[in-house]
Amino acid sequence: MKPVLRPLETRNSPRDLLFDFPRRLHAWCVWIAVKRAYANAVSDAHSVRHLKICGTTVRVPRYICALLIAAAGAYAPAHAADLMEIYREALEQDTLYSAARHAHEAAQEKLPQGRAGLLPTVTLGFVRRRQWIEVGNLSAAFPGIAGARPSDITIDNQSLTLTATQPIFRKENFAVYEQSKLQVAQADSQFIIAAQDLILRVAQAYFDILLAEVNLEAAEAQLKAIREQLEQAKRNFQVGTATIVDTHEAQARYDFIHSQEIAARNDLEIRKRALQQIIGRMPDYLRRPSSGDSADLLTLKYPTMQEWITVAEQNNLALKVQQSVYEIAKQDVERAKAGHYPTVDLVAIYSDQKGVGGTITGRPIDLTSKEIGVQVSFPIFQGFATQSRVREALATQERVFQDLNNTRRNNLLQVSQQYLNVTNGLAQVKALKQALVSSQSQVDSTRLGQEVGVRTEVDVLNAQHMFYTARRDLAQARYNFHMSRLRLKAEAGELDEEDLREVNKVLLR
């Protein structure tokens, strides 16, 4: 029978099929191996292989060996993805980044739209119609003509008009063009922010999963150790070497750690779902960082906080976006003031008419006219609407200016915080490394003290708890350091894919 392939978590796009191809290929290979094993079972049912197990030679049919090999292949671990592989997948699958990319493409059209107000406009109009004119009885108008009644008149006329207008002075159009350039620059900064946000979200989701796995491993290891203590306490109570108090204490500790293990498993599942939201599929395996992960290998580009603040004031993308918003608000004021200015246009008209004047004279004529001139329009009074729009635009400009100052202060705060998190986080990683070594020594010495009778099982469990806590804290400090460093570069406007690649190399070193 063919193996049942696990369905894709997302829609069957070419990208999804590409990432699912290794799993499908692996399943088909297993099926082919099983099929060949059955074929061998039919054709070579009596052939055997000699396997040596624990010094004893065992006669095993060859088809059994093939089935064992196929079963082992079926349980082969899947490829573990590292941080860069997850990031490259997120570039294609993340919906927020895709939306930002399309928004950036749409914003690029603001520039030609704004420029259009400075370019000429040409319109072509064409009209064709037919007129029926009833002349009436001529005997009423001319008594000498008795019973004279001419036939009705039918006139066909048409007109072709070509109009070209070139703005010479329109203050509002100039302001709109300047706004379009600012909007494109704003969209560029916003798209870079979206790209940096994707890097941060991928890294955070990746580290959250790794930390949740560490917490689960610690809970499982503590649960195993306490289970052994509980069994030992029960045996000691049965033989009379311990009291029921020891058993109850071990049971209470076991139940408490068991609840923590359940919570850790649930947290790991939630963290995986968070990454699934970004890459569009449930992550199977993530590559674990090596034990030699040295956060101190990553140094800061600028050594002092003031240098980072100076760079952030020049390159921070959120600050650039808000600066563009302020400049756009200033152009809104100019657009509102344009209501007080005249407009000057160069107008050229070409008109070709046929069948004109037939309604009056009864004999249509053809006319062709060409016009060129300057059209000037002066606004005199618009019910105080222009003054109101100017006041509104000025108030909006002041509000945006205050938002700009708030963004600048917030950027200063974020740079300072992330710089301190990086520098102090590095010191914390070094301290926790030493704490982990000391905790391991404490566990070893406490076990030795238990063997000689100067330490109890509770002391051993407490030492183990401190060891696993130090291990968890060290992992969390490492990941926090990496995230703080990435956020610091993002606040300075310098975060890119290369920074994520450096973190990935350190994790796998």
Image (spheres, grey):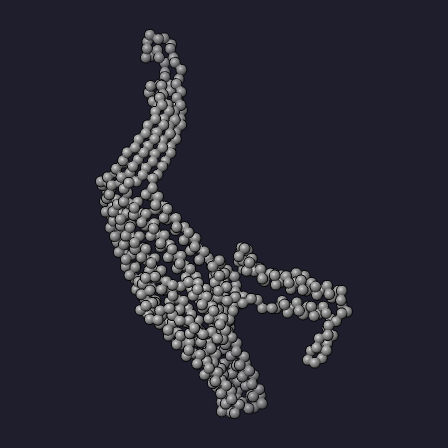
**Residue 392: x and y, percent?**
26, 51
Q: Could you tell me which residue is drawn at 53 percent across and 90 percent down? A: 451
- In the image, taking residue 151 as reference, residue 334 lies left or right, namely left
- The residue furthest left is 380
Q: Nearer the viewer, residue 370 or 16?
A: 370
Displayed quadrant of residue 475: bottom left
- Residue 8, position in %: x, y? 56, 59
Residue shown at 24% from the left, 39% from the top: 378
Residue 26 locus on image (x, y percent): 61, 63
Q: Do we see residue 326 in this rendering?
A: yes
* Quadrant location, the N terminus: bottom right
The residue drawn where x is 73% and y is 76% is 58
Asked if residue 427 is positioned above or below residue 373 in the image, the reply reads below
Instruction: Tell which of 314 and 266 is nearer to you.
Output: 314
Residue 135: x %, y % from top left: 36, 17
The residue under the point 61% across, 61% down is 25
